[in-house]
Image: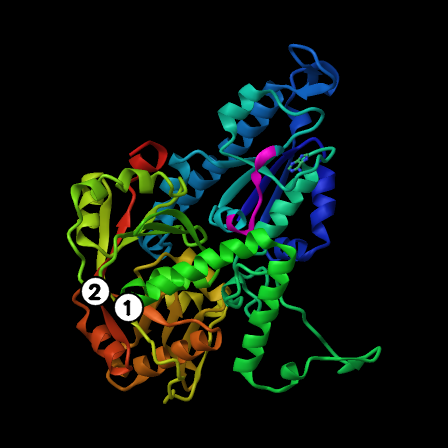
Amino acid sequence: MRFHILTLFPDMIRQGLEASIIGRAVDKGLIRLNAVNIRDFTLEKHGRVDDYTYGGGAGMLMQAQPVFDAWNFVCREVDEAAAGEKMTVSGEDAAEYGDAENRETQMGRPLRTVYVTPQGEPFTQAKARELAGEEELIILCGHYEGIDERVLEETVTDRISIGDYILTGGELAAMVIVDAVGRLVPGVLGNETSADMESFHGDLLEYPQYSRPEVWNGKRVPEVLLSGDHRRVEQWRLERAKERTAAVRPDLYAKYEVKQALIQSLTRNKRNHIHIMESLKGGRGEILYRNGEQLLVADREAGVCMLLFGSEGSTGEARTLPKKEGSKLTEMLSAAPKQTEWYVVIQEQLMNEMLAKGFLVWGKCSQYVYTQGQTLPVRFRDIRRLTPADLDYVSGHYRQEGKKYLDERILAGVMYGAFEDGRQIGFIGTHKEGAMGMLYVEEEYRRKGVGRALLSYNINRLLEQGRTPYGHVMEGNSASERLLEGLGLYKAGQPVWWMQKKLAIIDGVW
Ligand code: ADE
């Protein structure tokens, strides 16, 4: 991911970020920082970039011209780099480099441009997750009394405040955003601590933690943490996290309770709703629309919105919706984050209404859920977490996803490989939105229990994190269906349609 920071103090940005974990990620090439000096673009003598405010008032305003030219310079550079890369990948390389198509989208869409300002929307973890989905992010820092509104209207897609106080300039706010977004980029925190591996108390404040010695200053580490009982430790941590959040941040706690209540009501039909439940439990899912039984949950990090249109009842059968409810779709969709490309629905009527609005069906799947909770035996000796060195093998054998996405999944620490005599023969992983998938076993090793072992292994890792394993199988893939059923996963009554927004709709209205 690349951050372009438009600022009057580029050195402050460089120095402020180079010493941190973000600095290390820059050295490793995981993220790139481009601090651009707005002053270099002024057409005024003596490098002037500010002037008096029309209508009077104290202080000076940053003028439109240098800001616009600096922004344009970055946009052009990004487009040229993308076009250049596209020209260098051709023929077989293009197929190898699966995201070549996505670059079209990147080029066709205005670059995400954040203006940091006390007048913006509050910066939250959800916003950080959403921005982490961008490949290029421009952050514009103001100074003096702000920036001429006209250039903001021309360039800015998001206005963000990092808190209800006034800083002398936007640089510290920009650095806060780079830090919070940067740590979500796969690989920046390392496998074990990656954002994907964070426990499921996503919406609560962190519980208290202790390190050696066992007794310090007469204070003992709570006994339960020494017990080695994983379940009790998790329970204790959840309780402390809840207590702390309720005491310090009643606003966050209220939100948590709303989500918990929704998860509870979705549990009545767990097989059909597991994708929404897991996203909410993981702290990634946000309820952006709820009106009676109609629901839109966005997982911004995965770039997916999940819709529900009334309950399916305990049998899992979708009931026919009256026309009146159908007409709510426009209202629901307008609550979705603008950039969302993927939509998941489990009701045929809803799928049809979305088709009528110009959405495309990418695929129809069956949803499978592992509800037993106990770990499974893994009858294969050498299964281990993959590293970037395994990327070529994975991308060479799994064509449904681009190389970049697979690289991210490996860096997130959620891809596992099976090895025989040190040679890789298959792999599996967990998708960004939480579903298991990307299963592959070499032809000569099929029907020998390798797929079963990989799936069991993946299920066990998810259970360790307190998650409920689930997966989507493309309609007609009966080998995968048999495998999942053989391991005790249950099939949901409703199919799952993965739908995609057409490029034309991304930038416009419905
Ligand atoms: N610029 C000045 N104060 C700010 C704040 N609180 N958040 C974002 N940008 C700012």
For mark 1, what is the residue? 271
| Image quarter of residue 174 | top right
Badge 1 vs badge 2, beta-carbon distance below 8 Å: yes
Pinpoint residue 491: horizontal percent, then vertical percent: 23, 71
Q: In percent of the image, x 58 and y 41: which residue is there? A: 122
Pinpoint residue 263: horizontal percent, then vertical percent: 39, 62
For mark 2, what is the residue? 316
- Check the picture and name the quadrant holding the C terminus: top left
Q: Magenta segment, which residues?
A: 119-126
Q: Residue furthest right?
A: 217
Pinpoint residue 428: horizontal percent, then vertical percent: 37, 72
The image's colour scheme reads rainbow
Pinpoint residue 455: horizontal percent, then vertical percent: 35, 78
* Amino acid tagged 1: Arg
Give the answer, above or below, for where 416 lies relative to 12. Answer: below
| Residue 125 is covered by the magenta coloring | yes
- Label 2: element kind: loop
